[in-house]
Amino acid sequence: MEKINCDSYLEYLIETYGNLVFSICYKLVQSYFDAEDLTQDTFLSAYKNLTNFDGKNEKAWVCRIATNKCLDYLKRAGRKVIPMEDTYFNEVQCNKPSPEEHVLETDVKQKLFEVCSQLKPPYQEVALEYFYYEKDISDIVKQSGKNRKTIQTQVYRAKIMLRKLWRKE
């Protein structure tokens, strides 16, 4: 095809299949602005390859170009995730608590120790081991030599007592 025919044929393709190509792109990428860009890329690619086109089934040819452009875009988009300023720090995970979290945790731990210490034996020991030192019931059973059910009952009762004491403060 000569230059003038290529230009007019491209205009014909855009007028005839522009909405179809845009809808294909939009359904695949789910973004209006990206679909607009991909629609332009589709027709630019069609223009560059008009000399290779055999002229048969132009609708399928243009739709195939659009689909391939979208698939390539989605592959690239999956590989390059650019964190935005407001989401970057939410996505970055850090094992260390922030200074604010550290102070709050220290205060809560101190208050928990004081409240557990107010309980009478044997609930004081069980509460400190279970709630403050965060030991499993099986570890407390091994350490104390008491029956598992006894420790479970003491933890349950200590929890009720702690709740009452915590509310008073």
Image (cartoon, rainbow, N blue to C red):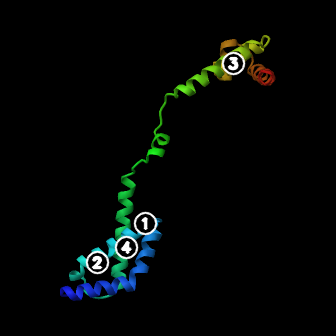
Q: Which label sits in the foreground, 2 or 1?
A: 1
Name the residue located 18 percent from the left edge and 87 percent from the top edge: 2
**Label 2 vs 3, first from the N-terminus:** 2
Going by the image, does 136 lie left or right of 164? left
Q: Quadrant of residue 64?
A: bottom left
For label 3, the residue is 111
Are circles 2 and 1 on residues that touch, CB within 8 Å? no
Q: In the rendered image, which quarter contains the N terminus?
A: bottom left
For label 4, the residue is 39
Amino acid type indicated by mark 1: Phe
Q: Quadrant of residue 28?
A: bottom left
Amino acid type indicated by mark 3: Lys
**Which secondary structure lies at badge 2?**
helix
Distance Cα–Cα, label 4 vs label 3: 63 Å
Counting from the top left corner in percent of width and height, residue 47 is at: 26, 78
Distance Cα–Cα, label 4 vs label 1: 10 Å
For label 1, the residue is 33
Label disc, if present, on residue 123 of the rendered structure = none
**Which secondary structure lies at badge 3?**
helix
Q: Residues within 10 Å of mark 4 (few under 14, many from 20)?
A: many
**Label 4 vs 2, first from the N-terminus:** 4
**Label 4 vs 1, first from the N-terminus:** 1
Counting from the top left corner in percent of width and height, residue 32 is at: 46, 67
Residues 163 and 19: in front is 19
Name the residue located 24 percent from the left edge and 81 percent from the top edge: 50
- Placement of 60 over or under 84, stated as above or below: below
Are circles 4 and 2 on residues that touch, CB within 8 Å? no
**Label 1 vs 3, first from the N-terminus:** 1
Q: Residues within 10 Å of mark 2 (few under 14, many from 20)?
A: many
